[in-house]
Image (tube, helix red, strand yellow):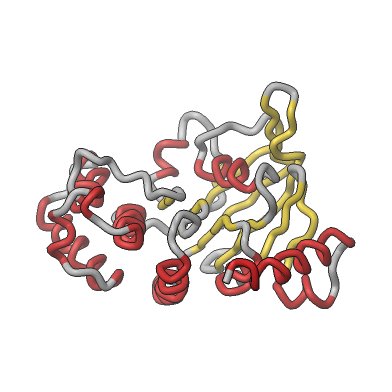
Amino acid sequence: MIRLEGACKTYRGSVALAPTTLTFAARQTSVLIGPSGCGKSTLLRLIVGLVTPDAGGVWVGGEELHKDNVERLRHGIGYVIQDGGLFPHLTAGENVALLARYLGRSRAWIEERMSRLVDLMRIPARLLERFPRELSGGQRQRVSLMRALMLDPPILLLDEPLGALDPVTRYELQDELKRVFAELAKTVVLVTHDMNEAAHFGDHIVLLRSGRVVQAGSFGEFLSHPAEDYVRDFIRAQRAAVPAAN
């Protein structure tokens, strides 16, 4: 469903992503993990076409991204950023329906789709009448996910969607999102810095460091066959941090 071939990106002489070749399988949840500045978000922005690779290419659904098709291909990609990115001057419902209305979908189509998404995300329909500032952090993220799913895209990209939430809400939404991913069977790429979260969600995990892929595979493979000492150290550091977080 998604393929990068030698894709790389540099900003002012600093390498954000070294030449990278990766494949993300259809209907699978892949997780990008690593420390801040390792290239996770850059990789995600390359996939959605928000930035252009300096070299190499990105293919979505078998079609290479370029300036003439990027807008059309984006309509097949749902994208959720860390704080949700909801427009504060629009109600939650207006945020969810914004792109569908822009593309000329009928009122009946929008209402039916909104009803399905309310059921999927298990939120009261009345919340859609509120503005983002009137919602809790967990509610805003649910609305953001509804907006990303409004056009029923085959691909869903999430950039640390739970990073700004309190621990209890984050724990609840982890299970909620995993249920949604399984129910919809979409191609999901999720960014996190938390290995426990990566293990919870990921069929396929990609660990990055300093703009390069260190290892890609299942969580079990990370534990049993670490590609280098950094993988082992990263997992050990994550586990050591858990008691302090509690």
> Quadrant of the rendered structure where residue 47 is?
top right
89 vs 225, nearest the viewer: 89
Residue drawn at x 41%, y 48% as measured from the top left: 83
112 vs 171, nearest the viewer: 171
Q: Position of residue 17 (x, y in %)?
A: 71, 39
Compared to 116, does 45 lie above or below? above
Instruction: Looking at this view, name the residue that lies furthest to the top.
Output: 12
Quadrant in which the C terminus is drawn: bottom right
Q: Position of residue 117 (x, y in %)?
A: 26, 65
Residue drawn at x 12%, y 63% as measured from the top left: 126
Quadrant in which the N terminus is drawn: bottom right
23 vs 17, nearest the viewer: 17
How many dots with numbers? Answer: 0
> Quadrant of the rendered structure where residue 220 is?
bottom right
Q: Can residue 166 be seen at all in this image of the molecule?
A: yes
Q: Position of residue 56 (x, y in %)?
A: 70, 36
